[in-house]
Image: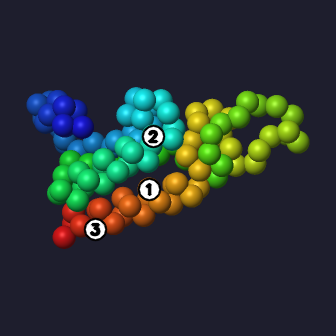
Amino acid sequence: MHYASRLLEQAGVCNRVMIDMSHANSSRDYRKQNQVCTNICDQLREGEDRILGVMIESNLIEGSQKIKPLDKMTYGQSVTDACIGWGDTVKCLTSLAEASAIRMG
């Protein structure tokens, strides 16, 4: 985040960033998004103002599935990238909101 912000600033544009909690930041393991969220919350509580948002790979049911006949599929589970489930999503959003409130003072 710091490197990206510095590059944006050097280019003369807004240096605020949206952090992808998935993909490379979670070592491509959707379950590690919770750890990434904890790190982001720590930064927000410490007053980091260059974070403007997050992207979460989220769905109703965690994980992912292959496309198959509709009656064999799990409703609410991704058919592309593996995602955290709704319960973890709520926990992440709640933590982010609380950390943002602390940052805002």
Q: Position of residue 10 (x, y in %)?
A: 11, 31
Q: Earlier in the sequence, mark 2 or mark 3?
A: 2
Label annotation for residue 92: 1
Q: Earlier in the sequence, mark 3 or mark 1?
A: 1
Q: Nearer the viewer, mark 1 or mark 2?
A: 2
Q: Residue at image x 36%, y 64%? A: 97
Counting every numbered tag in the picture gives: 3
The image quarter containing residue 46 is bottom left
Residue type marked 1? Cys
Residue type marked 2? Lys
Q: Position of residue 86 (x, y in %)?
A: 59, 55
Q: Rounded to the nearest whole Å, what is the CA distance between mark 2 and mark 3? A: 24 Å
How crowded pointer 1 is (Cα within 10 Å; few <14, some 14-19, many 20+) is rated as many
Q: Is residue 87 above or below residue 12?
A: below
* Nearer to us in this view, 19 or 41: 41
What residue is shown with label 2? 32
How crowded pointer 2 is (Cα within 10 Å; few <14, some 14-19, many 20+) is rated as some
What residue is shown with label 3? 101
Q: Position of residue 47 (x, y in %)?
A: 17, 57
Q: Is residue 10 left or right of residue 89?
A: left
Looking at the rendering, in which quadrant would you find the N terminus? top left
Q: Rounded to the nearest whole Å, what is the CA distance between mark 3 and mark 1? A: 14 Å
Residue type marked 3? Ala
Q: Earlier in the sequence, mark 1 or mark 2?
A: 2
Q: Residue at image x 80%, y 40%? A: 73
Q: Rounded to the nearest whole Å, what is the CA distance between mark 1 and mark 2? A: 12 Å
Q: Is residue 67 left or right of residue 91?
A: right
Q: Position of residue 79 (x, y in %)?
A: 68, 35
Q: Nearer the viewer, mark 3 or mark 1?
A: 1
Regarding residue 13, the answer to whether it shows in the image is yes
- Label 1: which secondary element: helix
